[in-house]
Amino acid sequence: MGPAGGDAVRQGLSSPFPVPTLPAPEQVLREVFGYGQFRGPQQEIVAHVVAGGSALVLMPTGGGKSLCYQVPALCRPGTGVVISPLIALMQDQVEALCQAGVRASGLHSGCSAEETAATWRDLETGQLDLLYLSPERLLSPGTLDRLAQAAPIALFAIDEAHCVSQWGHDFRPEYLQLSVLAERFTAVPRLALTATADPRTREEIRVRLQLEQDPLFLASFDRPNIRYVLRDKDDLRLQLLALLAEHRGDAGIVYARSRNRVDRLCSELQAAGYDAVAYHAGLDGAVRRAALERFRRESGVIVVATIAFGMGIDKPDVRFVAHVDLPKSLEAYYQETGRAGRDGLPAVAWMAHGAGDLPQLRRFIDDSNAPPSQKRIEHGKLDALIALTEAPVCRRQVLLSHFGESLPSPCGNCDLCLEPSTAQDVTEAARKALSAVFRCDSRFGATHLTDVLLGADTARIRELGHNRLSVYGIGQELDRSQWRSLFRQLLARNLLRADPERFGALAFGDDDRLKPLLRGEERLELRLPPPRRERRREGVAARGASVALDPADSPLLQHLKAWRLEQARLQGVPPYVVFHDRTLVEVVARRPRCLEELGQISGVGQAKLERYGPGLLESLRAFQAQALGSRQPS
Ligand code: ADP
Ligand code: ZN
């Protein structure tokens, strides 16, 4: 197939393993993928499959399903065969594997005759570790025979296994025929994987794929790095812009219910200076494909979409998913929000809901032509959504209990856990925030303004002389996250506005709203997060991230991302295939000085170390030298 660079990349690398001695799973994890530890049930699953066992694996999106078959495929003799329904996903995985030095290829309708022939040749000469196939291709005449003769098969992985279920939401008739694998290849382990957890679908998968006798591995469906934030709809446009102002340069998805709304919101975001693209079923296929490609290959693109968008997106660095309308069900909500933060770094699932949404949805159901039994089901789904919007203590507790899991204490990483339910008088604090904006000439964002208010001693503050401002250090009554929340809410109320031309620098907003506050004629009450030490289960928010980035380091991170984009462009692959954000963040935090130190960082396996290590270190050094130079007095 043609992941650009697939063959070229492979040629430059020898197989990571000498053929006869097969490596241990931990070694593959470390040397090929650059990870220190298995996650959740991965280790158990890998051991089971390496020993020849079959299984069904249920893990949430982003849980790490791929390694469950990629590692055993490299630890067992022969080629691992992966059945995957979506070409885009297959291409991503093949590209990512080739970058890691794994000999992977794919067969599907998008491959040319030469690519197909080359793949078969590699397979037949024992040159492939992993082969990705669409179900159509696998079941097309002759393929199974040829596979059986070509090479020993290490395992079959059946990805998105819920496609076999007629109950599920993406039934694909070809999946039903995959039962043939159990009959023809009795000795080959079969691993079925899905993120759809409901028990009915689960049982159907086991029956149809003949896995009734095999174990079920069920990972927790919790996604601790995702922060769930629900808001009452007020001025939706402003609220959304306030959210985006905190995510400058981040990739995100905004879900809206109708095509009209998608088009309108998308133009509004563009007008506000954001790199937004629209995606819905009413758009021409080529336009949709282009939007999808930009989202995958560039960084910081925001897709405004109906639910038509999402299947087949495994971009790891989506930092926010925003719902401006209620989703169809809690399952849909979980699946859509699950597209955020697959890399394990902090991400936000944000939703604005209005009092009018529910009656309208109820009416839709009542007015539809569905039979009464179906209407009851639909109303039940709405009830579950209401339970989320009206959660008494913690959103995550409601979500997980819906999926049959219980979280004993509140999560500490949702709006209800982070913000107390009573508003407090923040008039004085708001005035200080506004003075800071004014004293800093409306040229800085919330992070720097907070540093000034808290009297932080950073190089930037000293360079700018902001430690001599009258507002320096006057904001000790709130902590950092409270100031951030205050700035966010001032934005949402139009007391401040973010200047898109200046990377979100904050300036004064609506005069009519500001004046009464500044003159002391009006007081302002807002809900702020509790002070840091009082927060429950402190640290949960950061649990996903192994390292936190100092805001002062963000120029370096941007520099490394630009370097990565260049590497990706040269090969025609998405940037995250080169290195995940998470890896770059760790590089910034640790500042490795040599290849050996770089090799310790998560996500840097041997092949990537050889391929990119020298360039990455050079890019790091260049930035540091330049930063030093610019600090010298001229
Ligand atoms: P899924 O297919 O379940 O949605 P993926 O297999 O794409 O999830 O994995 C999600 C992300 O987590 C990927 O970026 C992957 O590289 C990363 N990942 C998976 N397992 C580990 C691990 N053991 N250590 C570190 N990162 C991991
Ligand atoms: Zn919570």
Image: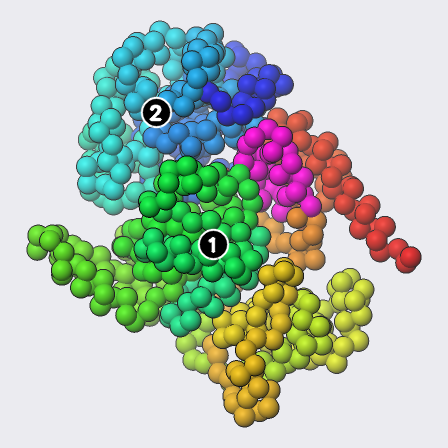
Q: Where is mark 1, residue-wise?
A: 320
Amino acid of disc 1? Phe
Distance from Cα at disc 1 to Cα at disc 2: 30 Å
- Main SS of the magenta segment? helix
Q: Is 477 located above or below residue 125 in the figure?
A: below
**What residue sits 26% from the left and 38% below the top?**
170
Q: Is 519 located above or below residue 377 in the figure?
A: below
Q: Where residue 388 sits in the image (x, y, percent)?
A: 31, 63
**What residue sits 60% from the left and 42% below the top?**
583
Q: How many marks?
A: 2
The mark that comes first in sequence, 1 or 2, is 2
Element on which disc 1 rests: strand
- Considering every residue shown, the one lying at the far bottom of the view is 521
User: Badge 2: how crowded within 10 Å, few (<14), some, or many (20+)?
Assistant: many
Q: Quadrant of the C terminus?
A: bottom right
Between 461 and 215, the one lying in front of the other is 461
**What residue sits 36% from the left and 58% below the top?**
261
Amino acid of disc 2? Ser
Q: Where residue 513 sits in the image (x, y, percent)?
A: 52, 82
Q: Where is mark 2, residue-wise?
A: 134
Residue 582 magenta-drawn?
yes
Between 170 and 221, the one lying in front of the other is 170
Q: Where residue 290 sits in the image (x, y, percent)?
A: 46, 39
Left or right: 390, with 535 as reference point: left
Q: Is residue 603 visible?
A: no
Left or right: 225, with 462 as reference point: left
**Which segment is the magenta one?**
559-585
Q: Where residue 483 sits in the image (x, y, percent)?
A: 58, 72
